[in-house]
Amino acid sequence: MMNTIEEHKLAFMNFTSGLLGGGGVQIDIKPPSRVLLVDDEPRMLSSLGELLKTGGYQLATAVSGFEAIDHLGKGKFDLVILDMSLPDISGREVMDFIISSDVDTDVIVVSGNNDIDSAIGALKRGAFDYLRKPYAREELLKAVGNVLKQRDLKADNQRFAWQLESSERVYRYFVENSPDIIYTLNNEGMFTFVNNRVEQLLGLSREELIGKHYSSLVHDEDNELARYVFIERRVDERASRNVELRLRSHKGYCESRTFENSLLTISFSSMGMYALNQNENNPEFLGTYGVARDITERKRAEELIAYHAYHDILTDLPNRVLFKDRLGLSIIQSQRNETKLAVMFIDLDRFKLVNDSMGHVRGDELLQQVAVRLKECLRRSDTLARLGGDEFILSIPDLRDRQDVAEIAEKFLDCLQQPFFLGSTEVRISASIGIAMYPDDGSSIEELVRHADLAMYHVKAQGKNGHSFYDSSMVDASHQKLVVEQDLHRALERGELEMYYQPQVDVSTGRIVAAEALMRWNHPERGLLTPSEFLPFAEENGLMIPISDWMLESICNDLIEWNTTLNEPVRVALNLSPQYLERGKFVEKLTSALKRHEISPQQIEIEVTENTFIRNPDHAIEQFNRLCQLGVSIAIDDFGTGYSSLAYLQRFSIHTLKIDQSFVKEIHWESAHSPIILAIISIAKGLGLNVVAEGVETEIQSRYLERAGCNIMQGYLYHRPIPKTKLIQKLAELESEQLEKSFEQAGAK
Ligand code: C2E
Ligand code: CA
Ligand code: CA
């Protein structure tokens, strides 16, 4: 597509030159002029012929009027030298024929004195010249030369006019069919010409536009710029090219007689027009010639791209980039007005569970609904942005004190706690909100965002669903987190991890039936760390798989040791991280480890939580079926707290349900009643499963559980998690006690 005037001109020239002959260069080979001599005197004719031959003309002769007419009817003559007095009809009548038959020729009349009148008549009829007999040779040659020269000129003019006309036609064709608006303005900025395209584009007819000032089309804000484009006086490369202006479109003409102006973005190229053939130093400025292209679509696309660079597509909220920009401005303003400003970091609790269990589409829907709800709680000056995932951030300017912010945070928490509906499913979530204040908690964008983030983590660590202001002590905690991450890499290499074991006791016999393997980290500086202090980081950093590999190997080694020491092999329960199951080739590794160490699969129980099924239930179930075939048993850990449905329980063989500690903890008094525990126990009985109670700390709890039908218990009341050597010691002691007992019994018999 053409865009500049230069391109238009070029295309036009190429097209017309093609139309008018090769490359615009025409070589004229002009045929000799043909002259008809008419005279009844043969002598006169022959002398005239002699005279004109020297001029290289092609001659024909006639001795009468009729003969002349006959010649003129058959051939084409440039000139007729016509004697007025002829024997048959007069020269005047020959002229009449020439006129009436539209013969294209010029005539010089020759006459004697006696027919001067008819000569005058001939001149009136358009004869070119008049010679009176007798005439001088030079006089004749001059007259003939004049006629033919005039004729040539006329022919040239005609040809030129035709060329002009056809080139004009071509030009018009181009102008009218151009995808662009092409226009000229006079030197006062009024439209003098505009092509048809203007109607489609602006909804104005050309008649409406001619004589109007250009400014009536231009969007007010662009008027200044428009002056340069529309009153463009320059013609060379300095002339305006591709200048973008917004024009009003008059397409939406309404009943109410008000224009509904939608704006179009138009790219203009224009140049000055000057009068030709004038004083080169000071030519007269006639106006402007311009080409305008509608680039509204392109502009919209560009705007959309720009919009997406600064907005989150899912929620339409500003993104991190725009947020930082706005926050920067708010900080400057707060500084100036000496007011406070809050940065609020909002992270949804348990969003991942919704996303994993209900799918990403529903997860996205939830985020959109959350965005809408949060927006409803905002003031005009607040900026809410989505940072990605389930993280939102908010800047709240013009605050008096912390109390204001605390109230706003509580309002957010409140509105998020109302149920959400995803399809027909009701979902409840909560959020953790961290707050950093300007200027107290930081003076830069980065500092404020980082500190709000830290405060948010603090809320998460404290049990989520709440708000917290940043406090400098939080930096230490986060620093510790960083240190843990770095140290964990080395912990594996340095052998700082160790498996502890917590016995599971059958209270009806007092025997240890199994032991749960629990990981510990002997941290060189911080002492013995429990899994909650480091496993979450391992999960984030991709260390879960190497750590689990280590766990598997060390459990196997421990088992070999206690199998050689003890008579009766005790089962070990190991905790399986979902990551290990999903990506760690756990089943293959376990199979080969058991084979390599010659350990019976019956000695292994795998503890998994219900959440293991959420992400990829089919894969998980397939893996569990393979484990069952191998002969290991499977326990559902923390049963009753997860998200999964009981339906999973029937899709593969489970051996054990572990009642979560939180339910056991609720039992404080002898008269306590826990319908959940009763339900879990009855499910286990119904499905023929073992049931283990976890976190048993008191006799009351133990008695309640035993009465409810659960005999196997794990908890501080019986044993804390202990190192392998201690466990072996305990088991050996128990064995010998048992042995003694049976001896005693045998002795008593
Ligand atoms: P879990 O599987 O529910 O393990 C039981 C937790 O309860 C253990 O915490 C145990 O020390 C604790 N516990 C036992 N009896 C009592 C009691 O009477 N009162 C109280 N308050 N707590 C009791 P621990 O060892 O800190 O482990 C925490 C969690 O870390 C475990 O929860 C398990 O999910 C995970 N974990 C532990 N070891 C491993 C491991 O080797 N691999 C994997 N993947 N996860 C592990
Ligand atoms: Ca467990
Ligand atoms: Ca548990």
Image (spheres, rainbow, N blue to C red):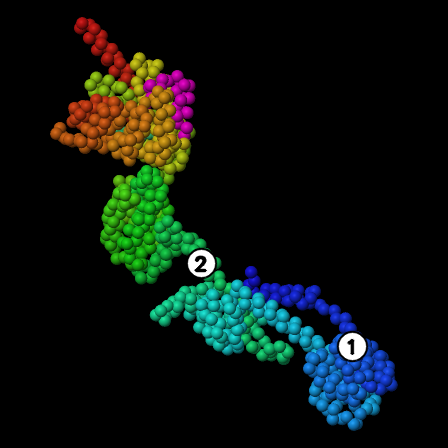
Which residue occupies 71% across, 68% down? 25
Q: Percent position (x, y) of residue 437?
A: 30, 52
Q: Is residue 356 visible?
A: yes
Q: Earlier in the sequence, mark 1 or mark 2?
A: 1
Q: Is residue 211 above or below residue 576?
A: below
The foreground one among 595 and 354 is 354
Asked if the residue at tag 2 contacts the one at tag 1, i.e. Cβ–Cβ closer than 8 Å, the answer is: no
Lateral position of residue 630 relative to residue 34, left or right: left
**In the visual, does 109 lie left or right of 308?**
right
Name which quarter of the figure residue 731 lies in.
Answer: top left
Q: Residue at x 31, y 34 (%)?
A: 611
Mark 2: few, some, or many residues within 10 Å (few <14, many ≥20)? Answer: few
Q: CA distance from mark 1 to mark 2?
A: 67 Å
Q: Main secondary structure of the magenta part?
A: helix
Q: Secondary structure at mark 1?
A: loop
Q: What's under tag 2, amino acid-wise?
A: Arg
Q: Which residue is mark 1?
A: 33
Figure quadrant of the C terminus: top left
Which residue is situated farthest in the bottom direction here? 114
Is 416 above or below relative to 224? above
Q: Nearer the viewer, residue 381 or 214?
A: 214
Mark yes or no: residue 439 visible.
no
Name the quadrant containing residue 12. bottom right
User: Type of residue at label 1?
Assistant: Ser
Residue tagged 2: 300
> What is the magenta range?
584-605
The x, y position of residue 544, in whole percent, is 38, 32
- 8 or 255: nearer the viewer: 255
Q: Residue at x 36, y 34 (%)?
A: 616
Is the CB of mark 2 within 8 Å of ligand 1? Answer: no
Residue 591 sits inside the magenta stretch: yes
